[in-house]
Image: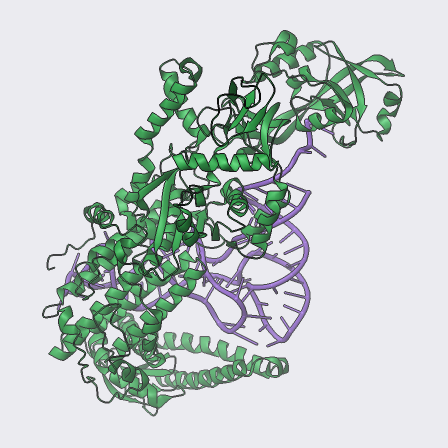
RNA sequence: GGGCGUUUGGCGCAGUGGGAGCGCGCUUCCUUCACACGGAAGAGGUCGCUGGUUCAAAUCCAGUAACGCCCACCA
C-alpha cells in the first residue's frame, strides 16, 4: 500500500466491506466457524423497529451500543448472535394503509377486512425492509439471515398459546370498563399508550337547577372542564360530610339537568373533594373513569353520548351530529343564553393524547379484554430485586418498581384489523365460548357456526414474547435445544419510555412461560438523543436528524463513535451534528497514523517479524529489570493475538506497550458497566495523545536508525496499531477493518470482525511503571524547552543546551531513565544535555524551569528578555508560595496531623519540602536578574 | 401531589473526600518529509446558592433556586 490518500473516505469502503462480511457469514451464530463453542453464547435481541419506521437518532444510538457489545463478544470468540426483525406495529401500519386508501377515496370498510389485511401485508413487502437496510448502512452486525417478524407463522402460534394459557388460567378476562379511546384510530388503548399533556383550558362553573328549591337554594353550581359531557350526566355528587350540602342531601334533592330536561339525583360520595371547585361534581358515568366508579356505587345509569369518532350521538338531544369541540361551544352558548354560566376560571390540566396520532383521548365505557396483572407482576418485581435482571444505570429500577407495584390491568383488545386476532370463539346459538389454539368453525356443544372475536391484540402483547418467540418458541422440539442453550439473552438495550410498554412485559411473560427464567441479564437504558438545544426531537418540531444523512456526510464509523462517546450514565445526549467534526477528525487521525506506518514499512514482513530473535537492547546502559526480561522471554506472549511480536527495547517501546496494556484492562472493566462514553474517550486519548503525539514521534528516530532499530520500530508500530484497531473495531468497524486488512500483522484471520480481542492477561506483562515514569520526565523536559522557545521566539532550528537537576526521591533511577532518552531529547527538542544529576548546577546565562522532580536550566546566552523572565519567575514563585503556605497551615493543624492517613501526611510534607526548595531556587534566580 | 435527573471555564461534557480535567471555541507561532480534519505554546473556572459533617468537600448530608423528564382519575 503506497498510495493512501490524505483523508479517509468512508463512502468508498463501507458498502463493499459490509457486503463482504455478510457473504462470509460472520454475523451468524457460529461466525463462520470462528466462535469457540465451549464459551457461553452471547445473544441480544434487537428491539424490533416498526415495519413502518425509518431510522431516527434514538435507533442510531441504541443500535450502535448493541453492535459495540455484539462485535466485542464476537471478537472474544463467544458464539454470538444479534437477532433482528420488525414489529407489525398494529396502529401505525394500519394508519399508513388507511391513508393510502384514503387517497383513492376509500375506507377500510369499503374494501373489507380480508382485503385490508392483504393490503397491509403488501405494504409490508414494499416498505418493511427500509429500516433493516438502514441498519446495514450503519454497520450493524445483526444476523440478517433469519430476520424475524412479529406475525411470522410460529409467532402466531406463540401468541395463541400465551392467550389461551392465560385465558384458561383466568388471567385474561373481558370486562366493561372506562378505557382510553382514540376517536381517530377508533380503538381502545392501554393506559401507558396515552401521553398526558398539560393543556391551557377553563373551568366552567355551571348552575344546575334543583327540581324543588331546598330552603333558599334554587340551584347547585358544578365545576367542569368538559361542559359538553353534561349531556350524559346522570347525577351530581357531593361529599357526604360537606356542610354546604347536608340540607340538600337530607331533602333528597334532585336536579333538572339543563338542556336535556332530565331529572337526576344528588348523591353523596367520599370521592368528592370538598376543597375543589364548588364541592359538587357532575357525574358522567360513560365518559369519566371516576364517574364510572361513582355510578357503580350508586347504581346510576350510564348514557353514552358519543359515536366512536367522538361525534354526539342520538343521546345528545339537539346537539346530535356535532363533533366534541363544536358540541362544547354549542353547549356553552346555550347555557350562557339560559343564564346558567355562573363564572369561568382559567385552568390548566393534563389531557390524554394518543401516542400514535396525538388525538385527544376519549375516556369511554366499553367492553374490552384485559390481562390481570397483579399475579404476573409480583415475581417480575422479585427478579429485579435480587438482580437476576439488572438495570443500567441502576436508578431505572426505581421507575420499574414504582410502576410494577402500582400496576393496573392491561387492556389488550384493539378495534383494528391489522394484528393478531383474538383467538376467542363464540357460539350465538348456545352461548358457548372459548379461547382456542386452532381455529374451529362449529360449536363443540351444539354444532352451530362459531364466530371469532373481531378485535386484535395490542401490539405489545406480541412484542412481549420477542426474546423467546424469535427462537421459535413454542415450536418444540426443534427449537427447544436452541432455546435452552441460548436463553436468557445477555443484554436488552432500549429507551426509557419503553420500560413499561415492553421491558416489564417481557420479564413477566418470560417468567410465566419459560419456567421462571428471565429474558435477559442486563437492561441498558440509554440516554435520549435531544437536539443541540436540549429539546426532544420530534416531527412537529421539525428538529429531527436523519442518521442516514450523517452516515452519508461523515460515514457510519464517525456517527457511531460520536454517539457512543457522548453516552454518560446521567445525562441525556444533546446532539449537535457539528460536533461530529471532532470524531471525523479522529477518524482522519487514525487513517493518517496508519498511512504513516504503511509508508515506513519498507523491508518489513510479518513473517520476518515472527522470528523470535530478540535484538540486543540498543542502549546497554539500560539493564532494565523486570519488563525487558519478561519480554525477552519469547514464551511470555502467546502468538495467537497477532503474530507480530513487539520488542520492548527502548523506554518508548516499553511505555507505549504499558499504556496499551492499561488501556485494554480499562476498556474491559468499563465494558462490564456499559460505560460507553468513557471507553470512547479512553480510546481517543490513547490513540491520539499517546500513540500519535508521542510514540510515533519517538519511533521516527528509530526508523531512521540502524537496520535493527528500524526493524524493531516497524514491528512495534505494526503491533500497537494492530491492537488499537482491534480495540477500536466495535465502535468503528469499517475504518479499522479497511486498515487491518492491509496491515502486515501476520494474523491469518480473514477479517478483523472475527479476529481476536486483545488479551488483557497476555498484555499484562508489559505493565511497566518505570517506563511510564520515563515518559513523564521526558515530556516535562521537552515541554519546558518548547515553551521557553515559544516565549522568546527562538527558532526550533536553534539548538539549545540544558542542564537538569534531579530533585525526586529516586534520582538514580530518574537519571538512568533520562539518560536513556537522550536521543529523543535531542531530536524532539533540538537540545543537548550538559549535565544531568542531582547535583547539577545552573549554567551561566540560563533560565530555570521547574517541573515535577526536575529543575531544568536552559542556556539562553544573549537571548533573554530580562523583564519578561523576571515577570515569569515572579509569577511562578508566587504560585508556589501560595501552595506552600496552604501546606504549612495544613501541617500545623493538629487535627490534620493526628487524623489524616499517614501517606497523606507524608505526601504533604514531601510536597512542602519540594516547594520550599523550589522557592529558594526561584528567589535566588530572581535576585540574580534584578 | 409524588419521583428522577441536571447545575463545573464562552459552548458541550468528564471528574465521588486530599487542592479541578477533556473537546470545541479563543490568542500566538508553525504549511519541516502521517495528518492544517494537523503540530506547538498560551489565556480562561471562588465547581448554582445557603448551611452542616470532616483535619480536609466539586465530591458526603440537609435545605434552597433554576431547568428538564417521568408517574398520578381533584371534576
> Which residue does the image show at 19% across and 66% down from the upper left?
A745
Up/down of A616 relative to A171, above or below: below
Relative to the observer, which residue lies in front, A877 or A854? A854
User: Given the current orientation, which residue lies at the most extreme bottom position?
Assistant: A839
Question: How many marks on residues?
Answer: 0
Q: Is residue A385 visible?
A: yes
Percent coordinates x, y for residue A608 in the rendering = 13, 73
Up/down of A705 relative to A513, above or below: below
Up/down of A544 relative to A316, above or below: below
The N terminus of chain A lies in quadrant: bottom left
> Which residue does the image show at 54% across and 82% down from the upper left?
A905
Percent coordinates x, y for residue A841 in the rendering = 32, 90
A552 left or right of A84?
left
Relative to the observer, which residue lies in front, A161 or A88? A161
The C terminus of chain A lies in quadrant: bottom left
Q: Is residue A576 visible?
A: no
Relative to the observer, which residue lies in front, A925 or A813? A813
Chain painted green: A
Give the color scheme: rainbow, by chain, secondary structure or one colour: by chain
Q: Colour of chain B?
A: purple
Choose top left, top right, bottom left or bottom right for residue A796: bottom left
Percent coordinates x, y for residue A542 in the rendering = 40, 33
A242 left or right of A869?
right
User: Given the current orientation, which residue lies at the most extreme top position?
Assistant: A318
Percent coordinates x, y for residue A414 in the rendering = 52, 27
A246 left or right of A455?
right
> Which residue does the image show at 43% across and 83% down from the upper left?
A919
Amino acid at each position: 500500500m503506497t498510495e493512501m490518500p490524505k483523508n479517509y473516505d468512508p463512502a468508498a469502503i463501507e458498502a463493499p466491506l459490509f457486503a463482504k462480511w455478510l457473504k462470509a457469514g460472520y454475523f451468524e451464530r457460529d461466525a463462520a466457524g470462528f466462535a469457540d463453542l465451549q464459551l457461553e453464547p452471547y445473544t441480544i435481541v434487537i428491539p424490533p423497529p416498526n415495519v413502518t419506521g425509518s431510522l431516527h437518532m434514538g435507533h442510531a444510538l441504541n443500535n450502535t451500543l448493541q453492535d459495540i457489545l455484539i462485535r466485542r463478544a464476537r471478537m472474544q470468540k463467544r458464539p454470538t448472535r444479534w437477532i433482528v426483525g420488525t414489529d407489525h406495529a398494529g396502529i401505525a401500519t394500519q394508519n399508513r394503509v388507511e391513508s393510502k386508501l384514503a387517497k383513492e377515496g376509500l375506507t377500510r370498510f369499503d374494501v373489507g377486512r380480508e382485503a385490508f389485511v392483504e393490503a397491509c401485508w403488501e405494504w409490508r413487502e414494499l416498505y418493511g425492509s427500509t429500516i433493516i437496510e438502514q441498519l446495514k448502512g450503519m454497520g450493524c452486525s445483526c444476523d440478517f439471515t433469519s430476520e424475524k417478524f412479529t406475525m411470522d407463522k410460529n409467532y402466531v402460534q406463540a401468541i395463541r398459546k400465551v392467550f389461551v394459557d392465560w385465558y384458561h388460567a383466568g388471567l385474561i378476562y373481558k370486562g366493561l370498563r372506562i378505557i382510553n379511546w382514540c376517536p381517530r384510530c377508533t380503538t381502545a388503548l392501554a393506559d401507558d399508550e396515552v401521553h398526558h399533556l398539560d393543556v391551557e383550558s377553563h373551568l366552567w362553573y355551571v348552575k344546575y337547577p334543583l327540581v324543588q328549591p331546598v330552603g333558599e337554594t334554587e340551584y347547585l353550581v358544578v365545576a367542569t372542564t368538559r361542559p359538553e359531557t353534561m349531556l350524559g350526566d346522570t347525577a351530581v355528587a357531593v361529599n357526604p360530610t360537606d356542610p354546604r350540602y347536608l340540607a340538600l342531601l337530607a331533602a333528597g334533592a334532585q336536579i333538572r339537568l339543563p338542556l336535556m330536561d332530565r331529572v337526576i339525583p344528588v348523591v353523596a360520595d367520599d370521592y368528592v373533594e370538598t376543597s375543589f371547585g364548588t364541592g359538587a361534581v357532575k357525574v358522567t358515568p360513560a365518559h369519566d373513569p371516576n364517574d364510572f366508579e361513582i355510578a357503580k356505587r350508586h347504581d346510576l345509569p350510564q348514557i353514552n353520548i358519543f359515536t366512536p369518532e367522538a361525534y354526539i350521538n342520538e343521546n345528545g338531544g339537539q346537539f346530535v351530529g356535532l363533533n366534541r369541540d363544536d358540541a362544547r361551544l354549542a353547549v356553552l352558548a346555550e347555557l350562557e343564553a339560559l343564564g346558567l354560566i355562573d363564572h369561568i376560571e382559567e385552568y390548566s390540566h393534563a389531557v390524554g393524547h394518543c401516542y400514535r396520532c396525538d388525538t385527544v383521548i376519549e375516556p369511554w365505557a366499553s367492553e374490552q379484554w384485559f390481562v390481570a396483572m397483579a399475579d404476573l407482576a409480583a415475581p417480575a418485581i422479585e427478579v429485579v430485586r435480587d438482580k437476576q435482571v439488572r438495570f443500567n444505570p441502576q436508578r431505572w429500577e426505581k421507575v420499574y418498581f414504582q410502576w410494577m407495584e402500582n400496576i393496573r390491568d392491561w387492556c389488550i383488545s384493539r378495534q383494528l384489523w391489522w394484528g393478531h386476532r383474538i383467538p376467542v370463539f363464540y357460539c350465538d346459538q348456545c352461548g358457548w365460548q372459548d379461547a382456542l389454539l386452532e381455529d374451529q368453525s362449529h360449536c363443540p356443544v351444539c354444532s352451530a357456526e362459531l364466530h371469532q372475536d373481531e378485535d386484535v391484540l395490542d401490539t405489545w402483547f406480541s412484542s412481549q414474547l420477542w426474546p423467546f418467540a424469535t427462537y421459535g418458541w413454542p415450536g418444540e422440539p426443534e427449537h427447544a435445544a436452541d432455546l435452552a442453550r441460548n436463553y436468557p439473552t445477555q443484554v436488552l438495550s432500549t429507551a426509557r419510555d419503553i420500560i413499561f410498554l415492553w421491558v416489564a412485559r417481557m420479564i413477566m411473560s418470560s417468567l410465566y412461560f419459560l419456567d421462571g427464567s428471565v429474558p435477559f441479564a442486563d437492561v441498558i437504558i440509554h440516554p435520549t438523543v435531544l437536539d443541540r438545544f436540549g429539546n426532544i426531537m420530534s416531527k412537529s418540531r421539525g428538529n429531527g436528524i436523519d442518521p442516514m444523512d450523517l452516515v452519508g456526510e461523515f460515514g457510519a464509523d464517525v456517527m457511531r463513535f460520536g454517539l457512543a462517546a457522548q453516552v454518560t450514565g446521567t445525562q441525556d445526549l444533546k446532539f449537535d451534528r457539528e460536533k461530529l467534526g471532532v470524531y471525523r477528525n479522529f477518524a482522519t487521525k487514525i487513517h493518517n497514523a496508519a498511512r504513516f506506518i504503511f509508508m515506513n514499512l519498507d523491508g518489513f514482513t510479518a513473517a520476518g517479524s515472527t522470528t523470535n530473535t530478540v535484538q540486543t537492547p540498543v542502549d546497554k546502559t539500560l539493564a532494565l529489570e523486570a519488563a525487558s526480561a519478561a519480554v525477552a522471554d519469547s514464551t511470555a506472549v502467546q502468538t495467537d493475538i497477532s503474530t507480530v511480536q513487539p520488542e520492548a527495547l527502548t523506554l518508548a517501546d516499553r511505555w507505549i506497550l504499558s499504556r496499551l496494556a492499561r488501556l485494554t484492562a480499562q476498556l474491559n472493566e468499563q465494558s462490564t458497566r456499559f460505560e460507553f462514553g468513557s471507553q470512547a474517550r479512553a480510546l481517543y486519548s490513547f490513540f491520539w495523545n499517546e500513540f500519535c503525539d508521542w510514540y510515533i514521534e519517538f519511533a521516527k528516530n528509530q526508523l531512521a536508525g540502524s537496520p535493527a532499530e528500524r526493524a524493531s520500530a516497524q514491528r512495534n508500530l505494526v503491533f500497537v496499531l494492530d491492537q488499537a484497531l482491534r480495540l477500536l473495531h466495535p465502535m468503528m468497524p469499517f475504518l479499522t477493518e479497511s486498515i487491518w486488512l492491509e496491515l502486515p500483522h501476520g494474523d491469518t484471520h480473514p477479517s478483523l470482525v472475527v479476529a481476536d480481542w486483545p488479551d488483557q492477561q497476555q498484555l499484562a506483562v508489559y505493565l511497566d511503571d518505570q517506563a511510564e515514569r520515563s515518559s513523564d520526565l521526558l515530556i516535562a523536559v521537552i515541554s519546558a524547552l518548547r515553551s521557553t522557545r515559544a516565549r522568546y521566539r527562538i527558532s526550533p532550528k536553534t539548538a539549545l543546551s540544558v542542564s537538569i537537576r534531579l530533585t525526586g526521591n529516586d534520582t538514580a533511577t530518574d537519571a538512568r531513565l533520562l539518560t536513556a532518552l537522550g536521543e529523543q531529547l535531542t531530536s524532539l527538542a533540538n537540545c543537548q544535555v550538559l549535565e544531568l544529576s542531582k547535583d547539577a548546577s545552573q549554567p551561566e546565562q540560563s533560565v530555570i524551569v521547574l517541573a515535577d522532580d526536575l529543575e531544568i536550566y536552559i542556556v539562553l546566552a544573549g537571548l533573554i528578555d530580562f523583564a519578561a523572565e523576571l515577570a515569569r519567575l515572579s509569577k511562578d514563585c508566587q504560585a508556589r508560595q501560595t501552595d506552600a503556605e496552604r501546606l504549612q497551615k495544613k501541617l500545623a493543624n493538629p487535627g490534620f496531623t493526628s487524623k489524616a492517613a499517614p501517606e497523606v501526611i507524608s505526601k504533604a510534607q514531601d510536597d512542602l519540602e519540594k516547594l520550599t526548595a523550589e522557592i529558594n531556587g526561584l528567589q535566588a534566580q530572581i535576585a540574580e536578574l534584578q
